[in-house]
Image (tube, coloured by chain):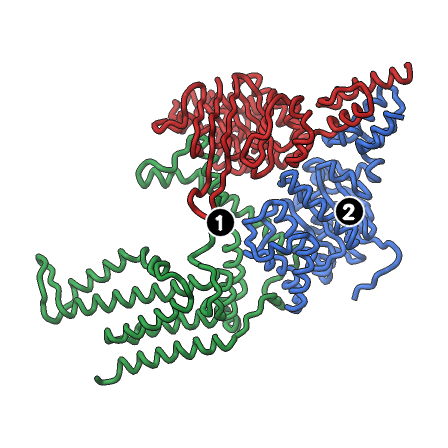
Amino acid sequence: MVKKVAVLENIIKTEELSFRYFTEEKKENYILKNINIEFKKGQFIAIIGHNGSGKSTLAKQFNALLQPTKGKVYIKGMDTKDKEHLWDIRQTAGLIFQNPDNQIVAAIVEEDVAFGPENLGIDPDEIRKRVDFALESVGMIKYKDLAPHMLSGGQKQRIAIAGVIAMKPECIILDEPTAMLDPLGRKEVIDTITKLNKEEGITIILITHFMSEAVNADRVIVMDEGEVVLDGTPKEVFKEVEKLKNMGLDVPQVTELAYMLNQEGFLIPTDILTVDEMVRYICQ
Amino acid sequence: MSIKVENVSYIYNEGTPFETHALKNINFSINDKEFVGIIGHTGSGKSTLIQQLNGLLKPTSGDIYINGKKITDKNINLRDIRKEVGLVFQYPEYQLFEETIFKDIAFGPTNLNLDQEDIKERVYEAMDIVGLSRDLEDKSPFEVSGGQRRRIAIAGVLSMRPKVLILDEPTAGLDPRGRDEILMRIKKIHEKYTMITILVSHSMEDIAKYADKIIVMNNGEIAVSGTPREIFRQVDLLESIGLGIPQITYLARQLKNKGIEIPEDVLTVEEAKEYIARYLRGVHNV
Amino acid sequence: MFKNISIGQYIPGNSAVHNLDPRIKIIITFIFIASLFIITRFTGYIFILAYIYIVVQISKVPFSYVLKGLKPIIIILLLTVGLNMFFTPGGITIFMLGPLKVTTSGLRLAGFMALRLIFLIIGTSLLTLTTSPISLTDGIEHLLNPFKKIGIPAHELAMMMTIALRFIPTLIEETDKIMKAQMARGADFESGNLIKRAKNLIPLLVPLFISAFRRADELAIAMESRCYKGGENRTRMKQLHIENRDYIALVITIFMVAVLVWNRFWKW
């Protein structure tokens, strides 16, 4: 039985997390190096970084698909190295992958959403209820009898999200869920997870290289070469324009503009993220 | 080199209950050395359109002229068209199949029945253009990184020495640095080798930087076409289609509405900075 | 364009036949096929025909679709008829075609074989016309379940079939994409003799296989992350229920078999 605690507890916590695949014990082979982070329940966290920064590997640590080489990862207090807790961990922290097609198992939408609860051995009537609820919460209930190949990329990702919701997770990790989608699909997915975060209180960890998706997060973490190099609110992170550009990352165009104007001696705050803010400051 | 598309329409599954009008009466022309961007949502018809240009699909009605030659003619040899018009699909790295990188890039020219010396020259040339070191020639394409594989795939089309290069979402799935790199390379290729480059994308920002002309597609039709600046002035139309304008252009419009001296069609951050700096200096009398 | 392809011959409908429990339908099909081997007199086929007619009427499937299923086996049919007609010893010779002779026993056997084959195909066609591939998979899984004890991997087989059904349209789309990409590089999938054409398929098959393996890998990881641990303690949302109509269908089928047995052994 899960007890709801009034205090904002840690849903994910890592201690000196380091990871390499089955390669030699050499510093260069480490994909993750001494990561120490804590995520509180109910937050919307964005993790950004260029390809190869280790962000996807980190996502797999949170779902116990990979275990730390050194250090520890705790999901709601459960150690990911503990075989006993493996399935509880995966049920608590669901993972959505980049390729919309390669995570849909069944030939009918509602059967795919039922896949997770079926694996958990849940009573068929309860599964039915969960499937309908999950499809409603991602706005796809009308599509429940369709075949997955008839859906658009954005719709497929929403089905994948529903499939995780049906397992009643406390946290959803999304590993570049929008990388293969068009702008409309991207919007669908981001709107869906924002809604789930705000309305259902589900902790969202969004791994992305689209800066516009990180701008509305509660917290942004920037990774480079397997380490956390920046950690803070979007405003705190994106004002580090030069650092981000050197890592090959983007900042919102208005933030870059503010930075450039600052370089020329104008006193414009460097943590401007939106057009409205910029307009306000210029027109004072 | 020129491309002319005249009253082209394309219908899928004609006569069945699944009939779809993917293209409706398309008319446009592209002149020598132009860098054209085609933008539109999935389903707007942009992918169907580019496949008409190299003969993979034939228009249900209408004609297409490549360099004056009518390719929609009955007796046209499709291989000849594909020599001139090269098409790089989305995620092209998924079409690699040969044992070595050299052989894969050589696939195109080999299909053109050229002699070995000619093929070798073309393969090396293509590798140089996309920035692949010649040392890689004997490696398996599956041994190298994703970014390199994409470049191998593009080289595989360039080795056919096309006069027109069409790329469908070449930045798909890439991170910001990857995106910039590949677009800059495409621009270099355009300037040095091909005569016409067509870039299909759904990113306004990408196209704005490089295109001479933009064609906006919606629902199988051309919604509007013109220079980037002309297009970005039509904000309401773009928004009604569901396409946006770059954030910086949006900012410029807002500022202009507040009476600041800045044109509506600003495309880059640099440009915006110049105008705004000028305004602020004026205001503070610096 | 490929989005509208449906798998197999299934024609959606709401008839009593469509709504039968898939397990019952599979069992009935087996009984039906077995019953074809009871028949030793041509009159027996009349009852079979009557049975088929009733099923087709109830299912509301157009008879032309049923006959379509015979198209692929026309050659085998002709071969069977020919071989039996010309090479059966015994009986009275009816006419000669050069060195080949057609006898009464030949004709009789040829006729029997042909009818048996035809009805066998029609029987299985009716199954696949009225049962969606997913239902069939469910039915097969449930029927194989009791055999888990003797080592038959019922759940794994069902999972393989489900995933195959799920990915067939996706793989067809991908084949199309790869074909187009290679054609854009001058590949030719149409001309040339058999050997040449087989060779020309390599640029299509290699990327397709590699992609399929990659998909399988990613899918396996995705399944694990949704707590898939094999068939142990796994429940199913869709439950199969045997209704009255299933009992009735079974009874009618067994009755037909009884009639065929009577037809065979009764000395008339």
Residue under the image location 84 percent in, 36 percent down: A235
Q: Nearer the viewer, mark 1 or mark 2?
A: 1
Relative to the observer, which residue lies in front, A156 or B150? Answer: A156
Q: Position of residue B191 (x, y in %)?
A: 58, 17
Q: Secondary structure at mark 1?
A: helix
Q: Report if residue C163 is visible in the image.
A: yes
Look at mark 1 in the image and give the residue it sits on. C4
Q: Position of residue C158 (x, y in %)?
A: 52, 62
* Corner quadrant of residue B253: top right
Q: Secondary structure at mark 2?
A: strand
Q: Position of residue B214 (x, y in %)?
A: 60, 25
- Please tell me if label 1 and label 2 are on a single chain: no
Q: Chain of mark 1?
A: C
Q: CA distance from mark 1 to mark 2?
A: 48 Å
User: Do residues under tags 1 and 2 come within 8 Å of each other at their CB atoms?
Assistant: no
Q: Chain of mark 2?
A: A
Crowdedness of circle 1 by 10 Å Cα count: few (<14), some, many (20+)? few
| Label number found at residue A17 | 2
* A199 relative to B61, above or below: below
Q: Position of residue A264 (x, y in %)?
A: 85, 19
Apparent colour of chain A: blue
B119 relative to B133 in the view: left or right: left
Locate the N terminus of chain A by quadrant. bottom right
* A85 relative to A62, above or below: below
Q: Report if residue B148 is visible in the image.
A: no
Chain that is coloured red in the picture: B
> At label 1, which amino acid type do we have?
Asn
A235 relative to B68 in the view: left or right: right
